[in-house]
Amino acid sequence: MADKLVSRRSGVTHAMGGCYDCNGGEAIWFARNAVACAANHARASGHHTWAEQVIATTYNGK
Ligand SMILES: [Zn+2]
């Protein structure tokens, strides 16, 4: 099954986010929940936020 090939080491390895209204293109949040922070901030303040993350996936066919 494909699911068994996915290593437990998979996941978000890098994440950051910010708010164009508060801090322009500079990131404010660096934790793995940066996406959630950006979403919450946008919802709470009505600001224009952004977030990006890198998700690494490894496979072990053994
Ligand atoms: Zn803001």
Image (cartoon, rainbow, N blue to C red):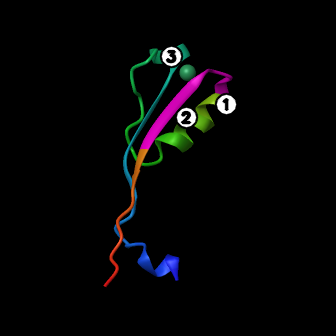
Element type at marker 1? Answer: helix
Callout 3: CB less than 8 Å from ligand 1: yes
Q: Amino acid at mark 2?
A: Ala
Element type at marker 3? Answer: helix
Residue occupying the point 47% across, 41% down: 34
Residue occupying the point 53% across, 39% down: 37
Q: Which residue is mark 1?
A: 44
- Nearer the N terminus, badge 1 or badge 3? 3
Q: Which residue is mark 2?
A: 38
Residue occupying the point 68% across, 32% down: 43
Instruction: Determine crowd level at label 3: few under 14, some 14-19, many 20+ residues with C-alpha closer than 10 A.
Output: few
Query: Could you tell me which quadrant the C terminus lies in?
Result: bottom left
Q: Which residue is mark 3?
A: 22
Q: Amino acid at mark 3?
A: Cys
Residue 7: quadrant of the picture: bottom left
Please give left or right for residue 53 compared with residue 39 in the image: left
Please give left or right for residue 37 compared with residue 53 in the image: right
In contact (CB < 8 Å): disc 2 and disc 3:
no
Q: How far across and down, in percent of the image, does residue 22 sit?
A: 50, 16
Residue 46: quadrant of the picture: top right
Distance in Å between CA atoms under marks 1 and 3:
13 Å
Q: Which residues are magenta?
A: 43-53
Quadrant in which ligand 1 is drawn: top right
